[in-house]
């Protein structure tokens, strides 16, 4: 006799799954836990944004969300909603760190820009100039192509995004894809690849002469006063780190599968709170941290060798929203979504993070709607 | 020029008031934080009770509720809902202690019963036998009359319920009313009086020969294994104590006014979690902690001298619910409500506590509805 | 150029490791977070036990500990120390659930005993009577041998204890070892094997005719009112679950590696709070839940076929401590330690859990020292 | 018979008092809960400062401390230590708001300075120019004298600091002292008076033509992006507000008495986190928020009419520390201490808050020692 061990006793009685619609309702109406900007001017925007976030949590079953908005370089609102940890009912606050996924690319791009500005990195040199160990296989890839997803490096396959392996170094993580055939001739097509950014971070190491995370820390995080953003080393004790959730087949929330993102720091391995993200974005609104020429390099969208627009610059997607130039990146992680958007002319920067997969966050709808509320009239 | 200092900046921006309907919605859909009874038999009842509590929180703007249910002397469900502290988002759990208000009278009645059982207290002797300092003023009051609200002692006047004064002893608290004229001839009328229970606790001290709180501890709490119930000394650090809220004029929640209940331990000064309350109630379902004769004394409703039924025994209200004998007490405190109900024949005991004034809790509706769900069929 | 990505920036600055001696010092002097027994008799014992726990936390770098003590079938003390989650500073309370490791065997043994008592399970029949799919390979194993670690089934090999795989059923988990050669002739030697208990739980399923976890729930947890003990399904949201830690090479604390214990519910996969464990143990102090004959079967230590004493009964280690008969089990998990001990004659039961590996807990020293404090004089 | 109700049962068993030395030891070794500045340059300073704070907590029995340090206008470190709420074990984080006591004077002084800069307030005009209702009693007081504690207005008497009364407006709070005789001829002596600042805030209302708290919000908090500082309205729900403690006679910690600081917003009624305080201080390091001339007015120490130095400017104490000019203020509240210090030449600003009375904090020793660690070499 073979019995399938049903989990009736456990699931039904002592633990719980939650229908998406109900969990969110919980978070929806929580009293504000904000260190809110004391600005009469922004108060109406904050009130509307708060309702927007709560409604989206209800509608989409999101356990926790964090939002920060900076206007003219100053954080005017940051607030956590819902829970960072459902099992122990830890409230999600503005300090809570969550996975930023591919927004890591935008953050990493600042280090690339600094090295270019310093004359240490030639975007158009072959990557082997900086990563001699990377196989040529008869084709030349440049750093600019990597940054613009034009190199032909492949993206995740199968369950690779659920990697639980600890990679000791950036170069070790190249083993995942370095011997795989390029998908197309470098420069000929736009194909989004996080692995391309693994190689990009190896370029950063080579150009800077020090480990990638050290470069990020010394050149980007420290000078900009970003105190929460770190690589999510799974064994490190990182204060205010959220738990991540996913929706089960029946619509209930479950703990997200365990993953170790050490295979992709540059392309998707950082965690941060939203305040740091808008401070980071605000530092790019005008020359200062980077000079004017480098900012132009950073934010100019690339074209394929055939001249087709990609709308993607160096770690930033370039577009338009309500007639305004928009620089943005979304980030999808296991159990999390992120969105960072800059409106340079309006001087408005918005970051939104959630601790479950939620299109409202990751797709940018939420962040854009919130940004609209804070636009100068 | 005289300006009224509006609180615009503070209230509107950095703190918050909450519409009753919205705060409750928050608590409504929170995932269960229960150490729930692993009973298939009770699971449906628990699910319905949970929905009932959440709905009432939504409808009535209640920040936090705790419920415990014991069947056959065993806790089959206890769960906290919402928040013990809104400012710091402390979840309300089954361990959270809240004011039990006049349910203190039911708890105190157990000490009275034990002293009667021991032959140390004659319920029909004048109170001066045990409290010689209490003025006679020409009229004799008995302990039974105090216990049954028949003595003619007055209740709170004006803002007395908001007392912030620390009384060093039970006898000191008698000063509040001891020189006031009785409201009627002792025994002639039922008039609910918490101050009558102040005097009752002085009787307990006199009969037992030790301080009231020591009697409660040594004779009631310790033998019954009640580990959370204590007098709410405002300066003591008491683990898991809730904050109390009240609804402001605009329907929003505010911190309840500060009170010091040391003027009325016996009649309304204890705090407890709900598990202790149902354990206490369960100990009275059958002879054991008290003998059969004493239980009869405790639970027999009194009559006025004219023979009118009062439906109130010694610290217990005696009634019927859905054809079953019911022993119950409600408790209203500043910023809190409590209800404890026993159905001796069904062997079901329910306790419900809230950290705001909520008729659903204090009026007993909630507790009775929950009890019905757990009744044996 | 190959750079090893040092984690200087991350580890040294934004996250942290803690020297064992210092983290514990933190927990050492925390104010009691106890719902403590209100017993003058036990107060001195509680005070000393509290000091003992704190000192051990200091000396051994333990982030969190929970203790419960039952005397005469009643919980007289339960208290959490330190933190259930260091990253979000969640206090560890008496409600916190932690891995109980091999104490799961003692819990599982109650189901075995009930099936024997019911006449549904013959301890001396071949296991294939209940698990026909288990390969015979020419040798007969009995349930009693499995229960007493006498069957010759192997234990973990290599990194098997760090399994991250989800097993859908008890029978699926037999695949790990079922085709391996027995270590010795059944009955001839004592060799501790958690896998033997996997097979034992398959026997329970076969004898009971329902899944193992359902049997545990319906026959053991529910009737005994154990409301916190559950199988640790990694994806389920389980309220009050602790995080687990381990000491790194430099003596600092780190997050314990991710594991999925679904490969060994019966032998090491339950989580519980300490109150449930002492309630469970208290139910075995005298006939009632089990009859006298079955209790004798449960607690009688076995011998090898050569007559050598094993000091191990059915899921219980049988010994002496300070002249008293002791029934106990320890449990070591990834990032946790557990100990449950019963002194039937003194009617004292103690459970201790920690959320890191700590010999003071798992080796039983702590539990025994605490028990001694509560012994009747 | 009169029995003093000892609190044996309650205090000894279910609640607790803590010896100063032990409670602090708890906080002492807690793992950092910092969103720490990612600066290699400051890391050594942070490590030493952390040890300093922990040692002081141990030595002085402080339940919770918050520290923030800004260098060159940027927060390089902020961290909470210990607990914001001992009863519910809420960790104290960098977001926790605590009473800043008389540091409120420094904050209020910014509004005074802005009104002077705007030409709306003449520091040397009689206060009745702005507060016509304030009795003259034959003597002229100027705003400058109030700001410099030279006016002869009295300070608290008796238990006035423990006021639990809610004052509806700044002008209502003048009733406390407005009819009292001046202590000395205006200008003739330095006599520290918080009530003088009540009158000062009435001057602000008169000069600005709007309520004091509105002025503070509109002119100071909002433009500087200070999002946590608010008047501590006792009934408002204010996120992240700490609980306050005091040491009892036996050295143990107790809940601080309830107070309502609405009688003294300007002189001692604000609460804040430390980050806001150092941001505020940083805004005064150079012309910008205030112009150079106004800054000079603000920071120039006054003299008595006899020419005696007072070392007190407008809401700032002016001194020297290790050869550097120091602008500072301490704040003592019921259950709290605060210190804010600016070293304009070194561009270092430090704020320290505690949720109990602690000389190490309020006396400035701690803040100055921490500042020294961050000084440029």
Image (tube, coloured by chain):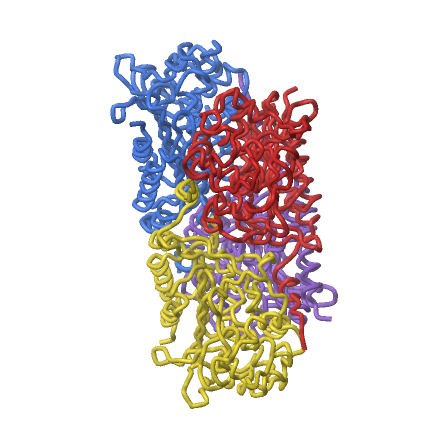
Chain colours: A blue, B yellow, C purple, D red
Relative depth, front residue between A94 and C22:
A94
Above or below, C245 relative to C185: above
As drawn, the residue found furthest toward the bottom would be B306
Relative placement, left or right, of B285 versus C19 is left
Whole-percent x and y of residue A201?
Answer: 46, 21
Task: Using the rendered image of the protein, determine whether residue D318 is visible from the camera's viewpoint.
Answer: yes
Residue for point 34% across, 26% down:
A328
Whole-percent x and y of residue B56?
Answer: 35, 61
Relative depth, front residue between C376 and B344:
B344
Residue for point 53% across, 47% down:
D261
The mark tally for this picture is 0
Above or below, A112 relative to B237: above
Task: Using the rendered image of the protein, determine whether residue D271 is visible from the camera's viewpoint.
Answer: no
Relative depth, front residue between C25 and B63:
B63
Whole-percent x and y of residue B97?
Answer: 52, 61
Within the image, what quadrant is residue B6 found in? top left
Above or below, C147 relative to C257: below
Assign the C terminus of chain C to one quadrant of the image. bottom right
Relative placement, left or right, of B241 versus B5 is right
As drawn, the residue found furthest toward the front would be D138
Relative depth, front residue between D298 and D309:
D309
Relative placement, left or right, of D77 versus B353 is right
Within the image, what quadrant is residue B229 found in? bottom right
Whole-percent x and y of residue D44?
Answer: 64, 28
């Amino acid at each position: 006799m073979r019995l399938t061990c049903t989990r009736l006793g456990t699931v039904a009685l002592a633990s719980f799954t939650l229908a998406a619609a109900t969990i969110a309702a919980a978070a929806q109406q929580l009293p504000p836990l904000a260190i809110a900007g004391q600005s009469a001017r922004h108060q109406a925007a904050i009130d509307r944004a708060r309702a927007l976030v709560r409604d989206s949590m209800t509608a989409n079953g999101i356990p926790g969300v964090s939002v920060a908005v900076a206007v003219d370089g100053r954080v005017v609102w940051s607030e956590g909603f819902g829970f960072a940890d459902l099992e122990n009912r830890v409230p999600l606050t503005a300090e809570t760190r969550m996975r930023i996924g591919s927004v890591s690319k935008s953050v990493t791009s600042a280090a690339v820009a600094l090295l270019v500005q310093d004359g240490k990195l030639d975007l158009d040199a072959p990557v082997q100039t900086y990563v001699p160990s990377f196989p040529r296989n008869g084709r030349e890839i440049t750093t600019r192509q990597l940054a613009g997803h034009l190199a032909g490096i492949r993206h995740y396959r199968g369950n690779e995004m659920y990697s639980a392996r600890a990679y000791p170094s950036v170069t070790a993580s190249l083993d995942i894809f370095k011997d795989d055939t390029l998908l197309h001739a470098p420069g000929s097509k736009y194909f989004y690849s996080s692995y391309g950014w693994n190689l990009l971070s190896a370029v950063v190491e080579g150009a800077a002469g020090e480990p990638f995370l050290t470069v990020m820390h010394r050149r980007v995080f420290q000078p900009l006063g970003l105190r929460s953003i770190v690589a999510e080393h799974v064994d490190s004790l990182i204060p205010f780190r959220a738990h991540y959730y996913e929706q089960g087949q029946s619509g209930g929330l479950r703990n997200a599968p365990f993953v170790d993102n050490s295979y992709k720091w540059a392309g998707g391995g950082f965690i941060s709170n939203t305040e740091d993200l808008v401070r980071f974005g605000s530092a790019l609104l005008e020359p200062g941290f980077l000079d004017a020429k480098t900012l132009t390099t950073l934010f100019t969208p690339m074209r394929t060798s055939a001249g087709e627009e990609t709308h993607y610059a160096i770690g930033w997607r370039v577009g338009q929203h309500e007639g305004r130039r928009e620089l943005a990146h979304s980030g999808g992680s296991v159990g999390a979504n992120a969105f960072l958007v800059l409106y340079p002319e309006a001087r408005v920067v918005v970051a939104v993070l959630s601790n479950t997969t939620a299109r409202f966050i990751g797709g940018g709808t939420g962040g854009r709607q919130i940004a609209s509320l804070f636009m100068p009239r």
